[in-house]
Image (cartoon, rainbow, N blue to C red):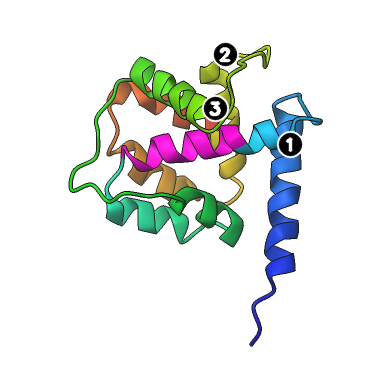
Amino acid sequence: MAINFNKYAEEGNLFVKKLAKSLEHPEEIGRTGIVLRAVLHTLRERITISESLNMIAQLPMFIKAVYVDNWKYRDKPVRLNKQEFIEEVERHQKQYGEYEFSWDKSTEDIVKIVLRELGTYITRGEFEDIIAQLPADIEELFRESMHHQ
């Protein structure tokens, strides 16, 4: 069976376009990809490797690729409160080339929108498992995302 890389690229482009529209910046496909990457990379550093593997098993190939890009294994996840989590997303955005935060939304709202769109693929049960590994004040970022499933 041949691998259909065009299908993965098409799925990825459709998802990023949908996310850009949800962020109310449909013309900002490149910047939207940076935001997606920043949220995923911040999250992956906060949960165990086994939980990461459970989560990415539910994701389509293109999001798996973004998630694992430059992944460095840690024995123990980094614990951050909600404000630190938001600041880490912003740090990742800058690291990946997104210096302007002129989205007319707070970073917290952007994170919620990204998580809501990821909820297209991630089950409610998996979100619950992820939440169980995070500090309580981060839970609200995920809870709102789960209400749209």
Amino acid type, label 2: Ser
What's the CA distance linking mark 2 and mark 3?
Answer: 10 Å
Residue picked out by circle 1: 29
Q: Is residue 116 above or below residue 80?
A: below
Amino acid type, label 3: Lys
What's the CA distance linking mark 3 and mark 1?
Answer: 18 Å
Residue 34 is situated, as x and y percent measured from the top left of the image, at: 59, 35
Q: Is residue 88 one of those drawn in magenta?
A: no
Q: Nearer the viewer, mark 2 or mark 3?
A: 2
Indicate which disc residue 106 carries.
Answer: 2
Q: How many marks?
A: 3
What residue do we see at 70% from left, 42% from top?
Answer: 16
Q: Could you tell which of marks 3 and 1 lies nearer the N-terminus?
A: 1
Query: Is residue 146 among the parts visible in the rendering?
Result: no
Which SS type dominates the magenta stretch? Answer: helix
Identify the secondary structure beneath mark 2.
loop
Do callouts 2 and 1 mark residues in contact (Cβ within 8 Å)? no
Residue picked out by circle 3: 112
What residue do we see at 75% from left, 30% from top?
Answer: 28
Amino acid type, label 1: Ile
For the C terminus, the quadrant is: top right
The span picked out in magenta is 34-46
Q: Nearer the viewer, mark 3 or mark 1?
A: 1
